[in-house]
Image (spheres, rainbow, N blue to C red):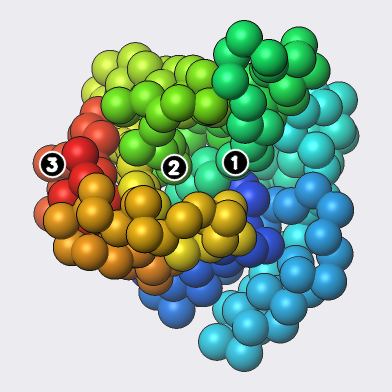
Amino acid sequence: METQSRVALVVGGSRGIGRAVALRLAAAGFDIWLTYRNNHAAAEDVRNAIMQTGRACRLMAFDLAQPTEIRRVLVPAVEETCPDVLVYNAGVARDNVLALMQPEEWDTVLRTNLDGFFHVTQPVVFGMLPRKRGRIVVISSISGQVGQAGQVNYAASKAGLIGAARALAREVGRKNIFVNVVSPGVIDTEMTHHLAKEVVLPLIPLQRYGTVEEVAAVVHFLCTEPQMYVHGQVIGVNGGMA
């Protein structure tokens, strides 16, 4: 890939894994388009950190569960300059056992995590095809691979992302567009602070939570490695948990 004027679109980049990915790609020479929903302070903090590396950062605020917002904010930018890299890092959770799950708990998670993938990725792929190059990395979850009690909605959305990415890889591989999935296990973020470590750690062979930087390192490889033959794959970053 070219080493100048590269743009990486990081969806959900204001906190956690997305923040680490944005900073890692900026350090690798990418200008960053960073999307977030409504945490303006966190997004500004990431932009300031990126600008300190000498790269540009464009903030885009929209709700992934609202297609009209995506079309209004993202689509005009993509039509003007298609990103070289897309990292889809959407993830909301509304945990509950299925017997007690409310329809809005199901709908919110599926609309954000899975439907949002279509509404963001479709215009980006449309722009990548005529250029015959691009990298797409989808952040799934170990829950989407092996399931997790109390997360039927979340697991369904993350498993759906794996299926969608694998199918997309078969569609666009001949156009030199690489599509892969990174599937984190238990990573030390706000989403895992409520977990009981005495219960979780015995399930992880490495006996510790992963870090956002360790996930970002794998994403960085998939986005930048020139000698690339990894395509349509699900790469687990889970400490041996699955």
The residue under label 1 is 90
Which residue is rendered at x = 74% and y = 52% of the image? 36
Q: Quadrant of residue 67?
A: top right
Q: Quadrant of the C terminus?
A: top left
Side of 23 relative to 138 (left or right): right
> Mark on residue 139?
2
The residue under label 3 is 229
Query: What type is the residue that disc 1 sits on?
Result: Ala
Residues at discs 1 and 2 in contact (Cβ within 8 Å): yes
In space, the residues marked 3 and 1 are separated at their CA atoms by 26 Å
Which residue is rendered at x = 62% and y = 9% of the image? 99
The numbered mark, 1 or 2, whose residue comes first in the sequence reads 1
In space, the residues marked 1 and 2 are separated at their CA atoms by 7 Å
Residues at discs 2 and 3 in contact (Cβ within 8 Å): no
The x and y percentages for residue 78 are 67, 41
- Please say whether residue 53 is visible from this viewpoint: yes
- Kind of element beneath mark 2: strand
Side of 71 relative to 178 (left or right): right
The numbered mark, 2 or 3, whose residue comes first in the sequence reads 2
The x and y percentages for residue 221 are 26, 59
Q: Residues within 10 Å of mark 3 (few under 14, many from 20)?
A: few
Query: What type is the residue that disc 3 sits on?
Result: Tyr
Which residue is rendered at x = 59% and y = 40% of the image? 91
Question: Height in image: 174 above or below 120?
Answer: above
